[in-house]
């Protein structure tokens, strides 16, 4: 039996520049739409603070380091 590589889970806090919260939300919606279809993407969600419109949390879970590396090189990620 071989050991399997554990998922790579990242939780990222993001803060939009002044006046850019709506644009960041739209960009994250687009990023989420494209990322969830990637092979190896287990979860990709974002949350926006109810009390600070400029504050976001991004939750990323990929099946392997290779899947995360592929994601980071995708055109929609760059």
Image (cartoon, rainbow, N blue to C red):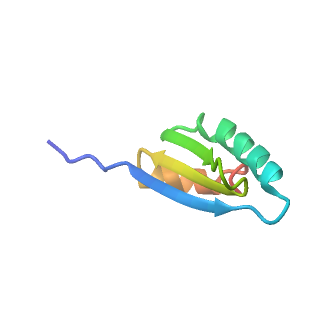
In this view, the residue in front, 9 or 41, is 9
In this view, the residue in front, 12 or 18, is 18
Q: Quadrant of the N terminus?
A: top left
The answer to whether residue 64 is left or right of residue 55 is left
In this view, the residue in front, 8 or 21, is 21
Residue at horizontal 70 percent and vertical 47 percent from the top = 28
Location of residue 71 in the rendering, given as x and y in whole percent from the top left corner: 58, 50
Above or below 32: residue 53: below
Above or below 54: residue 64: above
Q: Residue furthest front?
A: 51
Which image quadrant is residue 15 in? bottom right
The answer to whether residue 16 is left or right of residue 51 is right
The answer to whether residue 18 is left or right of residue 68 is right
The answer to whether residue 57 is left or right of residue 9 is right
Q: Residue furthest left?
A: 1
Q: Quadrant of the C terminus?
A: bottom right
Residue at horizontal 83 percent and vertical 58 percent from the top = 20
Location of residue 26 in the rendering, given as x and y in whole percent from the top left corner: 78, 44
Location of residue 64 in the rendering, given as x and y in whole percent from the top left corner: 41, 49
Residue at horizontal 26 percent and vertical 46 percent from the top = 4
Q: Residue furthest right?
A: 19
In this view, the residue in front, 31 or 78, is 31
Number of numbered callouts drawn: 0
Location of residue 45 in the rendering, given as x and y in whole percent from the top left corner: 57, 42
Residue at horizontal 41 percent and vertical 53 percent from the top = 8
């Amino acid at each position: 039996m071989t050991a399997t590589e554990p998922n790579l889970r990242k939780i990222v806090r993001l803060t939009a520049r002044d006046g850019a919260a709506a644009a960041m939300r739209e960009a994250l919606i687009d990023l989420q739409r494209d990322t969830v279809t990637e092979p190896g993407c287990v979860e990709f969600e974002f949350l926006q603070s109810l009390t600070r419109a400029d504050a976001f949390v991004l939750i990323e879970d990929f099946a392997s380091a290779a899947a995360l590396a592929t994601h980071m090189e995708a055109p929609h990620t760059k």
